Amino acid sequence: MNKKLIVIVGAGPGVGNHVAKKFGDNNFRVVLVSRNKIALDQYVKELESEGIETYVVVADAADPSSLTEAFTQIKKEYGTVDVMVYNAAVLKDGQPTSLTSESLVSHYKVDVAGALHSVQQVISDQIAQKEGTILFTGGGFALSPSSSYAALSIGKAALRILALTLAEELKSQGVFVGTVTIAGNVDPDTHFAPGLIAEKYWDLYKKREEHEIVYN
């Protein structure tokens, strides 16, 4: 039986890599995508030490052409993407009055537009095979915005709407879309440990019932 392929845009030592481990432990091949090649190579060593087949592709979530090139390479080298997880975000604080239109757009490019562009790279193949999964890392600021994190609150709210509208559009075409809305600070050895949160991504993938899990 051929292994399915999961691609995680926004790889990192928290939620992203724990989602990779969860799916890898369940016979998925893993492709990690981020800007930092040195960090990516370290993540590969960590996952492969646990017997998970892992590859990396360098790309900038803020740059559509970079994402297009990354997914073209992934499809060429590893095949159709069965599960795509978008885990990238700009995690910076700031009051709404401290924002400029330019800084807000720079956040939005990563938090929302990069998510949509990543979806567009995999969706045609998933629709063609009438099977596929797209998952987003949401945040509690989408439900309870904070003035101290204005841009991130705006981004997570928009990402949530993107996820739910995509879910509605693509459901009849065999593609499942879901989001894990993490309503707290990710922190090891707490209820918000990334390994525990990663279980919810697996639940969405396996059960394919609710399109949003609020983890609080």
Image (tube, helix red, strand yellow):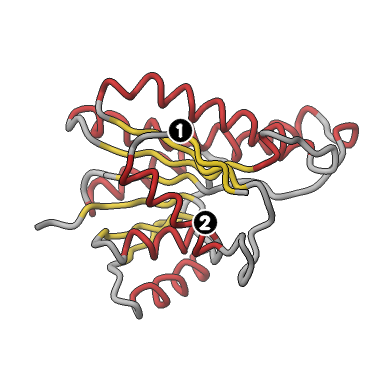
Q: Residues within 10 Å of mark 2 (few under 14, many from 20)?
A: many
Identified at 58% across, 64% down, the residue is 193
Q: Is residue 111 above or below residue 49?
A: above
Give x and y (percent) for residue 95.
87, 38
Q: Is residue 81 left or right of residue 180?
A: left
Callout 2: helix, strand or loop? helix
The quadrant in which residue 108 appears is top right
- Measure how far apart labels 1 and 2 are at the Cα level: 25 Å
The residue where tag 1 is placed is 117
Give x and y (percent) for residue 191.
61, 62
The residue where tag 2 is placed is 197
Amino acid on which the number 1 mark rests in the picture: His
The quadrant in which residue 81 appears is top left
Q: Is residue 32 above or below residue 167?
A: below
Q: Is residue 20 left or right of residue 196?
A: left
Q: Residue furthest left?
A: 1
Mark drawn on residue 39 = none
Mark positioned earlier in the residue sequence (1 or 2): 1
The quadrant in which residue 144 appears is top right
Residues 19 and 109: in front is: 19
Identified at 64% across, 59% down, the residue is 186
Circle 1/circle 2 CB separation < 8 Å: no
Identified at 72% across, 36% down, the residue is 153
Identified at 43% across, 46% down, the residue is 85
Amino acid on which the number 2 mark rests in the picture: Ile
Quadrant where the N terminus is found in the figure = bottom left
